[in-house]
Image: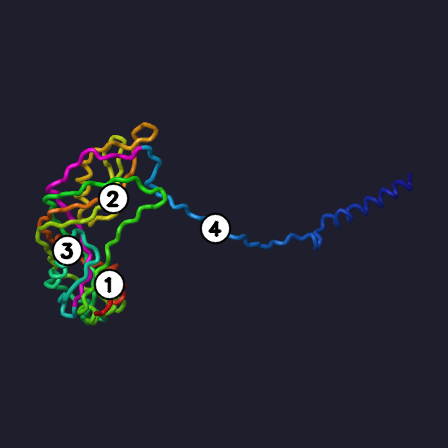
Amino acid sequence: MRAASALLGVVLLVSPSTAAQHTATRAWQQRLQVDVPLAVPLVELAAINPFAQPIDEPPRLLASAAPRKVDVSGAAVVAAYVDARGECLGGVPLELPFPGLTARLAEELASSRFEPARAAGTAAPSWVVLEVAMAGRVKESAPAAPQLELPDPTRPPTPHHPERVSPPGDLLRLPATPASELTTLAVPRRVKLAAPGGDAETAARALVHVTSAGRCDRFVILELPSGLSQWLSAYLATWQLEPARRGGAAVDAWVVYTGRVLVSLSGLETTSARTLADRSYDPLAEPDATGE
């Protein structure tokens, strides 16, 4: 019994030490935090047109009417060269709300007056970008027969951007203070652009939503002077269509409308003009500027 008790005492004395050795972290057992960069996977975007959907039978136009006496409005964006005396010596149209305005705007700008731009308090010649609001009326219109087609499922729609107009050679040779050196921009005192009435033809292209009831309830312009959007809205409101069908049932669908239209415009008048402080124009930086 004494021998057994002595042996038990030795075991009790040794056991805590042995347990401590087992619970202690050895150097080769330490966890290393190593960041291993993983390759970033390449995701290829599928060319998907959100306006396209499976259709068994596309919409079909049954009737339409050319709208008359439609009030229209839009804004022309023009780059004007203003000398140190505040006289406008010419301009370049950047965005036109109506067809046939290019030459007329250049002529009308020549009679406009400005408070000239300034660099460190001194009047300086410069280019300034103006927004000129204009209003008029489409007296008559003659749209060509519309062409309707379903959107291409693999080609998202892209708006058409008109070609930029190059500035005349005489304007390119005039000195102009860079916009970065100006402390104040040129401001119009009197800008009154006007264009006489007349006929003008233009292309029209738009995404048109046709409801299951055979009516147009919204559209997205892809190609059309912005000032004629009111005319297009009035024209689409007259459309009567056989709606698209899927599985024999009438369904909503988008179609691409393409055509041309001849409009008879009344005289266009300026309603307001302002300097666009967030836009600048450098004719030498334009891709079509040749200096000739």
Question: Looking at numbered disc 4 in the image, what kind of residue is underneath it?
Answer: Leu
- Residue at left offset 34%, top offset 28%: 247
Q: Nearer the viewer, residue 21 or 264?
A: 264
Quote the CA–CA distance across marks 2 and 3.
22 Å
Quote the CA–CA distance across marks 1 and 2.
30 Å
- Disc 1 crowd rating (10 Å Cα; few below 14, some 14-19, many 20+) is some
- Residue at left offset 29%, top offset 29%: 250
For the residues labelled 1 and 2, say whether their Cβ atoms are less than 8 Å apart.
no
User: Which quadrant of the rendered structure holds the N terminus?
Assistant: top right
Q: Which residue is mark 4?
A: 42
Q: Which residue is mark 1?
A: 281
- Circle nearer the N terminus (1, 2): 2
For the residues labelled 4 and 3, say whether their Cβ atoms are less than 8 Å apart.
no
The relative height of residue 156 versus residue 250 in the rendered view (above or below) is below
> Element at badge 1?
loop
Q: Is residue 76 in the magenta section? A: yes
Question: Looking at numbered disc 1 in the image, what kind of residue is underneath it?
Answer: Tyr
Q: Which residue is mark 2?
A: 206
Q: Residue 26, how many percent across, how many down?
A: 71, 53
Mark nearest the camera among 1 and 4 is 4
- Disc 4 crowd rating (10 Å Cα; few below 14, some 14-19, many 20+) is few
Q: Which residue is mark 3?
A: 101
